[in-house]
Image: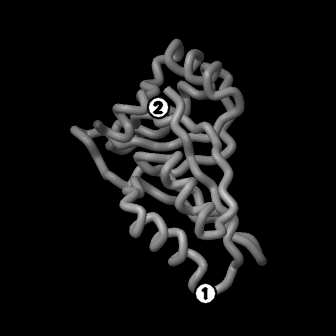
Amino acid sequence: MKLTQLSLFLENRPGQLRVPCEVLGKAGVDMLTLSLADTREFGILRLLVREPARARAALEAAGCVVKETEVLGVEVPDRPGGLGEVLAGFDRAGVGIEYSYALASGSRDGRAVLVFRVADPDGAARRLLEAGVKVLTREEVLGG
C-alpha cells in the first residue's frame, strides 16, 4: 500500500526546478505529481514517479541529493465535503498527517487521490482501512 516518494533539496533561486524535470524527461521517467515547498534558502521538491529507482539513479547521476520516503495514496470523494469525511477517518484511526498533496491526474470516476505522509505507513494503512478510509495500492495510484 505504500508509495515511494522522492524528495530533493533545491536552492531557492531561479532555474533550480527545471534541472530535475529535465533530467527525468531525458531519462524517460514519467512524473505523476509534484509538490514544491519552500523556505527562505531551500525548497523541497517531492515527486511521485512510476519508476522511483530509475528516477533516483538518473537524478543522483546529475548531482541531485535524493531522499526516499514512504507515503500513502488515499481515495477521496471528489465532491464538497469529501476530504472532510476522509480526514474524519484519519481521526478515528488516530493517524496524524505530516503533509499532503494531490495527485495531478485529476478526478477518477468522481474520486480524487491525495498523497499523505504519516508516521508508520504500514500501521497507519491498516488502521485507516479499519476506519473505512480507502487506502490505495501502488498499482491503483500509479497504474499499470
N-terminal of the two: label 1 or label 2?
1
Q: Which amino acid type is marked by label 2?
A: Glu
Question: Which residue sits furthest top?
Answer: 130
Q: Position of residue 101 (x, y in %)?
A: 52, 51
For the residue labelled by badge 1, is the local secondary structure a helix, a strand or a loop?
A: loop
Which residue is depicted at the point 64% across and 65% down?
37
In-image side of 134 versus 99 (left or right): left
Which residue is depicted at the point 61% across and 22% down?
122
Characterize the local packing of mark 1: few (<14), some (14-19) or many (20 or more) Cα atoms within 10 angstroms. few
Residue in the foreground of this view, choosing between 129 and 79: 129
The residue tagged 1 is 14
The residue tagged 2 is 85
Residue in the foreground of this view, choosing between 4 and 97: 4
- Closer mark to the observer between disc 1 and disc 2: 1
Residue in the foreground of this view, choosing between 138 and 65: 65
What is the distance, in whole Å, between disc 1 and disc 2 at their CAs?
A: 39 Å
